[in-house]
Each structure stands twice: as C-alpha cells, then as structure tokens.
Image (cartoon, rainbow, N blue to C red):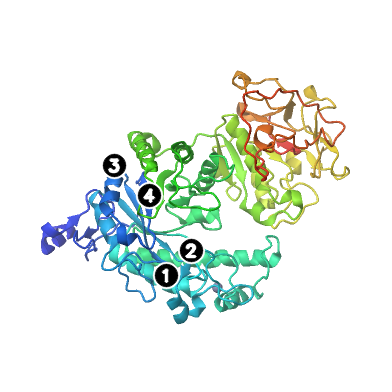
Amino acid sequence: MNRRQFILAGLGTPAITLHPGSPINFITDPATSLILPGATPRTRPRTSRMRWAQLAFVENDPKHFDPDFWLDYFRRIHADGALLSAGGVVAFYPTNVPHHHRSDWLGNSDPVGEMIKGCRKMNMSVVLRTDPHATRQDMFDAHPDYISVTADGKPRRHWANPDLWVTCAYGPYNLVFMTDVHREIMQRYQPDGIFSNRWAGHGICYCRHCTENFKKATGLDLPRSERRLDPAYQKWEAWRKDRLRDVWFTWDGEIRKQRASARFIPNGFPDKLETGKFADFFFADQQARRGVIPPWSNAMGAKELRAGLGMKPIVNIFSVGVEEEYRWKDSVQNDAEIRIWVAEGVANGMRPCFVKFGAYIYDKRWMKAVEKMYQAYLRNETYLKNTAPLARIGLVYSEQTSQKYGGKPWQEKSNEHALGVYQALVEEHLPFEMVNDKLLDRDHLKPFRLLILPNIAALSDSQCRQLRDFVNAGGSLLATFETSLYDEEGQPRNDFGLTDLFGVSVDRTNAPGTTAPVHHSPRHHSPGHHIPRRHSPGHKCRPGRRPHAQLLPPHKNRPPRRERPGRRLQDHQLRIQGKGQTQLGLPFSRHPDPHLSRPPDGRRLPQAGRDRHPRALPQRARPRPQHRAPRPQSRKRPRRLHTRATSTAVSGRC
Ligand SMILES: [Zn+2]
C-alpha cells in the first residue's frame, strides 16, 4: 500500500476525491474543498492549461452571484484554468486575518470555496487573485504606517473611492499583512498559484518605512520629483525594484511552503529580464486596446515577454469590456474587436484568459464570441502547444534605453522607433521576434540572421561587443538614429559604440534641419536620395567603408501583392541583404503615412523634406479615393504610427 492508498483507506473513500490526472496529487474533501493532510504535492508548477477564465468579483457579488451559471459557462467553453478573486481590498471568503475586510455581502457564504469546488470537479487548475493596493479605515486606525504617504506628508486617499486608503507596497503592509493573507488562502484552498493585481505601488511613497529604508540603502533622501532622468529618481527606481523583488520572493516562498508546486505570479514586474528568470509561468495583463493602438500591440507584449520567458507558459488576460479612459466594466466590446485582439496573442504563443469584472452580467453578447473562440482553440490545441517561433529576424527592445536615454524633446518617445519598425515588418509579412537587449549572448541570438535596433541608443561596451560577435558569426544588423551613441547609464559617447561595425561616425558638422545622405549602394546614388536630418547628429562614412544598404526608388523590386488597388506604395524601400540571403524590404517613408497620421479634418501635415528642405524628393501624386467616408471630427491629434525619417546604418557581411 502506498501513501496515497493509505490515506484513502484511512479516511474512507466515499468522502474523498483524488484529483484525476492532476499533476499535483493533492486530496480534497468535496464538501469543504479543504486540503487534507498527507497530500504529496509535486514541486513543478502546473503548466499545461490552455484556456483560462477569470472572474474578478466586485464587493456585492456574493449577494446575487450564481456559481452554477459560471461553472456551466466554463464547461461550455472548455476552460481548463480558472483565475478567481479571493482577497486583498475585499475578501470573498470567510477570512480570519485581522483587518482583512470581508465583503459586506458575504454573510455565511464562501464564493471562492464554492467556485473552487466546481472547478476541481471539472479538473480545472485554479489560481487565486489578490489585490493589495488599498485598504479601509480600520486598518488605517490599527496600522497607520501601512498607508502610503504623499510628498506633502499626508496619508494617501484612494483616487477613485474616498472611503479607501492607498497602501504602501514596499513595507510591512505587503511583507507582513499580505503574507498572512496569502498563507491563509493557501492553507484553505491550495490553489495552483496566487496572482496579485496592483501589488507594485503607485509612485513614490514617503511613509516612514520608505524614508528609512531608502536612506539605509542609498544614503539619500527620497526624491521629490518623478522626472525619469533625475539621478535621484533613477536610484529610487532601482531601490523599488529591489523591494518588489523582496515582496515577490517573500510571497512566493510562503506559497511554496504551503504547496511546493504553487507559485506567486506578479501582475507585472519592472524588469522583463528578471521576469523571465524568476517566473515559471506568467499572466500578461494586456486586456484590450484603446484609442488608435493597433491590435498587434498584444502580440508585441507577448513577444517581449517571450524573449525572456522562452517556452514557459504565458497566459493573456483579455477584457471583454471597453478599455477607454473611463472604463465601465459592464460595457462590452464587439465580437470582431475581441477576436482580433485575442488572435494576436494566441498567434504569439499566449493562452487566452477572458476577464469579467463583476460576476453579475448585464450584457451577455460577448459570451457567444468567447465560446466560439475557445471551442476553436480546443479543436486546434495540438497546433498551439509546444510551438517555437521560426523567425530569423530579431527586433531588439531595450528597457535600459527607455529608462536612461532622453532629455531632448525628440528623444522622449524613443519607443516610437520600435513601433514604426514593428508596423513595417507586419505590413511586409515578415516573421520576427522581439529580442531583449540584455540577452544578446550567442545562445539567445542563435536563431537570428538579422537584428534590427530601432534607436537602441543606450548600449554598454559589453552589449556592443556581443553585437560584434553576432556580426562576426555571420549575422546582419540594421540600426537607426542614435543606436549605441549612449552608454548603459545614458551618458553620451563621442562616437557610436558600433562605429567600427557600421563604418560610420557621428557627423556633427551639419546643424539640425539640413539633410544627410542615407548609406546606400552607388548604383542608386543620386542627389535626391537624401533623408532629412531632423534632429539626428547625422552619420558619415568612415574612409574606405561603404555600408550595405540600398535605398530603392518607388516601384523597384516591389512584390506584386503590393500593387493591388487602393493600397498606397511607400515612397522608398530600404533593402538590405545579409549573409545567408536574408533579405528585408522595409518601407522607408520620408514622411508620416497619411493613412495613419492625417488629422481627422483631412488637412495635410507638414512633411519633412517638402516643407522644410529644398532638396527633398517630390512627392508622388496620389489621388484620394472618392468613396472614402468622411472621418469623425476630433480635436485630438492621432498618434503617429510610421517609420521615422531617420538616418540609418546597416552592417553585416553582405
Ligand atoms: Zn511607503
């Protein structure tokens, strides 16, 4: 008789359920859903779940909550994982932790336990959600030091609900109180993990714990401003990351103590490299788009996480509600919007997880759409599991550049360079992956033949060396604007860190507003092939070197599929060719794409080159289609999504 049989025999089988097929081998009493002693948990997290369902309870849900309705829906959509709200601001179970506020509508009920019981009958994984960002008056009275403090020394009221206080994320509220909450949740329900929402604080907190701890760590007083490039603020950011890592590890350690295979899953951590290193699986809270954000932004988030997490499972939390500035969580997106958003995530390896805020439903229209999607994902599950990208193009992103580079107006939105290249690659149907700039070693770059560095301005000497190694091993690089002109601390260099690789140096002789020649082959050289120098320091070829890029005039070497009616051809193509026949045709526009950036009233934006520079290329006449409907009036200028007019350097063995 083994341990499991012994336990079953000793306790009487009729009342006990041994979870069939469960990788965690725990035993629960179906009446109470409590874990019985003697379970032998596995130490590996449960990672095979493909279709998730999230119910984010609101305070009055226990009053009119119908668990059967939801369990039936979970069954119909073949959900195999559930993410359920349990505690934090509000406890949806009969908690015994002091000052852990039970829902005012809880009474004697236990919505969490009831749902877990139903989910486990269907062999679903269960992850429970906590939200520690706010608390009530009784906590304030008992532990005033748990409350976040503003710069003027006042305890911080909640921005949306004045009955609540915002908590300090970096001190004992998280490290002591929330650890107690997580311990209790684990002991009662033994979920596969705990996911915390809004756990990472809201800006600088000036409470006594933060003041003392920051001083002890850095010798400094807390910064008074949140200017990104302020050295004191950057020190605080680094300290905050250390504190959040402590919180993560404290909670994760306590959770594993209660069940070895369970994990803490943070909703975001301010470093994707560490996220990939420490997380065994991850929930990406990328609910929906707003404004003119393209649907592929969900894919971009997936690719950025995958760069660090590799093949570890990433679950995509998507919303069925509208995610505009004023989010009414009972509103509903239309089917097409939900489908395209989720498809972008699934196509990039994420596992879908719908989230419904509030368990009482006013509008059920989204349910059929999600049901159809999930059923299709079930039918095609074989093709969605254990997949690896085959892309040979890597688009580098750099949190280091986002944090350390800038200061001048044109440098502030450095991420727009990546957005432009991303859009260009999508338009050209070129498969690509995102590459974390901290993972430029040989193993991580092995799949790639071409790396694109869209204004990856802040690069250390070591990173530059890794890029050199990549090129020496046969890889190609395409870099734009001020790539490598700054070091890892954002300090400017005298010349590009990669100057030897590209064969170009900074050209500081021309003032901004003049034009600079793009590096191209002599075949296409003409005085017209100039890119307006807007703010770039400019590039000049080093003696005896010729970069390996071709700026092609319109209509040359264009694939036929681009010629279809109604589709505007880009002005130019920047073509590069690397070793191994890697070929990339990037649409290279000197001005914003009018399809994406024309103001709603139809007037033409000032165009770099034509409006400012006498030597600019003439723009091709393009009649505007007559059938186009008038665009809605808006005073907001739409966000530009285009390849920036920048100087570009290419290197590689071509
Ligand atoms: Zn604090």
Among the two numbered marks 1 and 2 on one chain, the one whose residue lies closer to the N terminus: 1
Q: Position of residue 338 (x, y in %)?
A: 45, 40
Residue position marked by numbered label 4 in the rendering? 362
Instruction: Indicate left or right for 25 with 422 as reference.
Output: left
* Residue in the picture at 14% in, 57% down: 5
554 vs 370: above or below: above
Residue 473 visible (yes or no): no
Quadrant position of residue 65: bottom left
Mark 4 residue type: Tyr
Question: Which callout, 3 or 1, points to the residue nearer the camera?
Answer: 3
Residue 438 position, x and y percent, is 59, 51
- Percent across and percent down for residue 21 are 24, 48
Q: Nearer the viewer, residue 79 or 265?
A: 79
Find disc 1 in the rendering and name its residue.
Answer: 178
Specify the label residue 85 is tagged with. Answer: none
Q: Does any portion of residue 93 appear in the rendered image?
A: yes
Asked which secondary structure carries label 1, the reply is helix
Of circles 1 and 4, which is in front? 4
Tell me which amino acid carries mark 3: Arg
Report how far apart the C-alphas of labels 1 and 4 lie in the structure: 33 Å
Q: CA distance from mark 4 to mark 2?
A: 29 Å
- In three-dimensional space, the C-alpha distance between marks 4 and 3, rounded to whole angstroms, equals 20 Å
Residue 519, quarter of picture = top right
State which quarter of the image contains the C terminus. top right
In the image, which is nearer the foreground, mark 4 or mark 2?
A: 4
Q: Which circle marks residue 76 in the picture?
A: 3
How crowded is the residue under tag 4: few (<14 C-alpha within 10 Å), some, or many (20+)?
few
Residue to which mark 2 is pinned: 199
Secondary structure under tag 2 reads loop
Q: Is residue 271 left or right of residue 219?
A: left
For the residue carrying disc 3, how many other residues have a C-alpha within 10 Å: few (<14), some (14-19), or many (20+)? few
